[in-house]
Image (cartoon, helix red, strand yellow):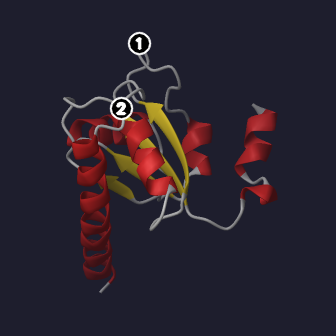
Amino acid sequence: MNNRLWNIKNPYQGPQKRVLCVCSAGLLRSPTAAWVLSNPPFDFNTRAAGIDTDHALIPVDDALIMWADEIVCMTTEHSEELLARFKTYERPVLVLGVPDCYARRDPKLVEMIAQRYPEELELHRKQKAAEDA
């Protein structure tokens, strides 16, 4: 774990926002979200993981959460499970509302993520500003 903890702060990762994308198994929706968000116009440093430890090839863990500047969940159920099992270290957690009915990089899925991410980010910012006021 020490090497993983060092990698969280590895300075060679660059200045881009680090976004952890989460779905059930980390196989279809979250890798697609990570791909979309790592390309223009976003250009983020992304990772994909699954919240379901019985099915995820790369399960969500504390190191991934500590690495992330922001966490993007595909459904409310994913965000609720994430918040129940982990400290989110005050990271923003966005929910895109993406159902589990798409293949990896399905064009409809790609379009949905590209559209919903900025909308959810703006909603999160407004909610945070209202809380801080």
Residue depicted at x 53% and y 63%: 43
Against 6, residue 44 (above or below) is: below
Marks 1 and 2: which is nearer the front?
2
Indicate the secondary structure of the residue bearing disc 2: loop
- What residue is shown with label 1? 54
Q: Position of residue 34 (x, y in %)?
A: 46, 46
Circle 1: residue type = Asp
Whether residue 89 appears in this view of the structure is no
Residue 131 — which label? none
- What residue is shown with label 2? 104
Against 87, residue 100 (above or below) is: above
Residue depicted at x 18% and y 36%: 99
Give the position of the C terminus as an image quadrant. bottom left
Q: Position of residue 111 (x, y in %)?
A: 26, 53
Q: Position of residue 80 (x, y in %)?
A: 28, 40
* Horizontal side of residue 83 vs 13, given as left or right: left
